[in-house]
Image (cartoon, helix red, strand yellow):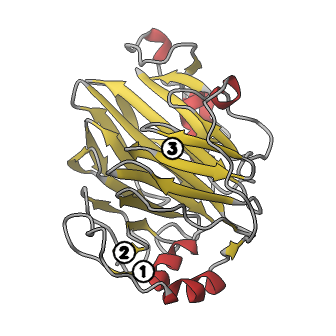
Amino acid sequence: MPDQMKAYILRQGQALQSRLAAGQIVRILADDAQTAGGFGALEMEGTIDKQPIPLHYHNDAHDTWLCTRGRLKVWCENECRILTPGDFAYVKPGEVHSYQAIAPRTAFFGIVAPGGWEAFFMVAGDPWDEPGLPAINHPFDFSKMGKAMAMYDVHPVQGRTYATATDWSDADRTMPRANQSYFLQDGHGPRVRTQGHLCTMLLGRETADGSMEMRVIEGPRGAAMPAMRHDATHVFLRMLEGQVRFAMNGAETILSAGDSANIPAGTSYATQVMTGQARWCLTSAHGNGLEVWNRLGQETPYYTPAATSESDAVNAADLTDVDVTLI
């Protein structure tokens, strides 16, 4: 684990730390030290859970789930949905929630803000460096859970009933503007077309009390964003599908599905899609730098990227109040 904040890339399966907790592999992709306290970034993977994680709440933490494989059951208060790849859930502080993997191999990418809560798994879990999932009967020391819960703002709730999962509805296809928990079905949310990409909002800064935001970006081969950097905004990139040519501080590499990049404030970065299609998730904290996607784009009713056009020309005047410098 880096001993100070730095730009870095993690390849699929790599992590700053990996832990086995209650039968699930938890990969810590970024911690509070690497995001200036903004958030912790996690990947969790497991097989079918015999039972849900106990119902609980956090006083301060904003919790998210972006399903990337299998089927994930998520509860929030009196609602429950079954997430499949691309579906998203957000739970605000103070609301009772839980989750359960219900497919033979299920994975999700999650952000918890503010940073620091991800250390829960360092206390609750055991080191794990095996390439595959643990056996169903793999032993786990549950006595660590109580200590970790007391240390990291995890408050179990007794006597509550797990709600029955219901079908997705029209309400799950619109991201609420108010500060509330919600489920968001794959592909839905505010959309803009930017430089040939489609940018879909998963979580807005105003919804998360200004702590963070999350967007899914997708584009066809050749779609590129100009190199940029942010003075205050910290960005974390998680590849979901395909490949992009990624430049960070002038050094180029190829990012593929499952790879991640930590992009601290002051770091220059740029992307160009190399495969037929590519999708990735951007998370940010400490500033409005990701607003560049809206300012250089335009709202669109379509669910797919579009070719660039003259209307995609970059106008720096549109970015005067955005934390971004185009390079």
Identify the residue shown where x is 73% and y is 71%.
158
Task: Find disc 2 in the rendering and name its residue.
Answer: 20
Q: Which one is closest to the eye, mark 3 or mark 2?
A: 2
Kind of residue at badge 2? Leu
Task: Find disc 3 in the rendering and name its residue.
Answer: 325
Q: Which mark is residue 125?
A: 1
State the SS at label 3.
strand
Q: How many marks?
A: 3
Residue 261: percent from the left, percent from the top? 35, 55
CB-based contact (under 8 Å), mark 3 and mark 1: no
State the SS at label 1.
loop
Identify the residue shown where x is 70% and y is 68%.
58
CB-based contact (under 8 Å), mark 1 and mark 2: yes
CA separation in Å, label 3 and label 2: 41 Å
Residue 106: percent from the left, percent from the top? 37, 51
State left or right for residue 107 relative to residue 153: left
Kind of residue at badge 3? Thr
CB-based contact (under 8 Å), mark 3 and mark 2: no
Residue 244 sits above or below residue 4 on the image:
above
State the SS at label 2.
strand
